[in-house]
Amino acid sequence: MKRALLGLVFVFVVFLSGCIGGESISTTSSSVSTATTLSEWKADGVIGENEYSHKLSLANDKFVVYWRNDEEYLYVALKGQTTGWVAIGFEPSVAMKDADMIFGWVQDGQIVVIDAYSTGTYGPHPPDGELGGTNDILAFAGKEENGYTVIEFKRKLDTGDKYDKVFKPGQKIKFIFAMADVDDFTTKHNIARGSGELTLDG
């Protein structure tokens, strides 16, 4: 892929049902890509300067996705204006169905990150392990501060798990996102939800 196209992000916003019932919540988005030299990635719950090569703001900046990748790994940070859970779901087929999902939150100082998969149009989204798959989050961290939750994680582009989507450098990846004000990921989102698209470097 030509360098001029690297990091180009096409964003679209679609209102999703996320889970059964509930009022549709509108979202807006903006994206930023940088060509600066990246600093070392660290799973510490802190989004450092130049730690990520891309940033995508959604839901009036209530939810922000940061990412970078190399030939083997994807590194992501989710920042949500909530003290509950934040989530991203990669490549759903329709609404939530077949989405490769990551949920994260901080509860009593403990960071919880779940590698999940949505089996239905509006869920449920059990952990991969309950479906016969594996937890393929290689490193993670989180932080809850001043009304925001940050979750960072690392995974392989191709984990070998049928409940994880396979990614390739240069690929455009559609995703859904959501967040709630509680720490129970089985509870319906109630702050924001929506969708977007990110492009991996290649």
Image (spheres, rainbow, N blue to C red):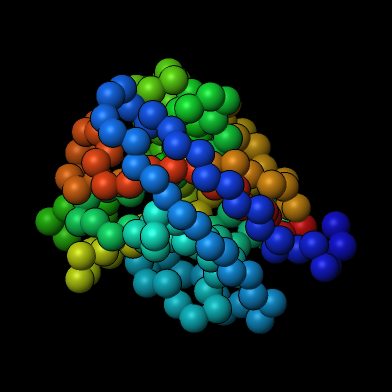
Does residue 58 sit above or below 96 in this rendering?
below
The answer to whether residue 109 is left or right of residue 29 is left
Is residue 85 something that shows in the picture?
Answer: yes
Q: Nearer the viewer, residue 162 or 178?
A: 178
Is residue 153 something that shows in the picture?
Answer: no
Q: Nearer the viewer, residue 191 or 47?
A: 191
Residue under the point 53% across and 62% down:
30
Q: Nearer the viewer, residue 55 or 48?
A: 55
Total marks shown come to 0
Q: Quadrant of the N terminus?
A: bottom right
Q: Quadrant of the C terminus?
A: bottom right
Percent coordinates x, y for residue 116 in the rendering: 41, 33
Residue under the point 17% across and 60% down:
109
Does residue 20 sit above or below 165 in this rendering?
above
Q: Seen from this angle, which residue lies furthest left?
A: 108
Percent coordinates x, y for residue 87 in the rendering: 38, 45
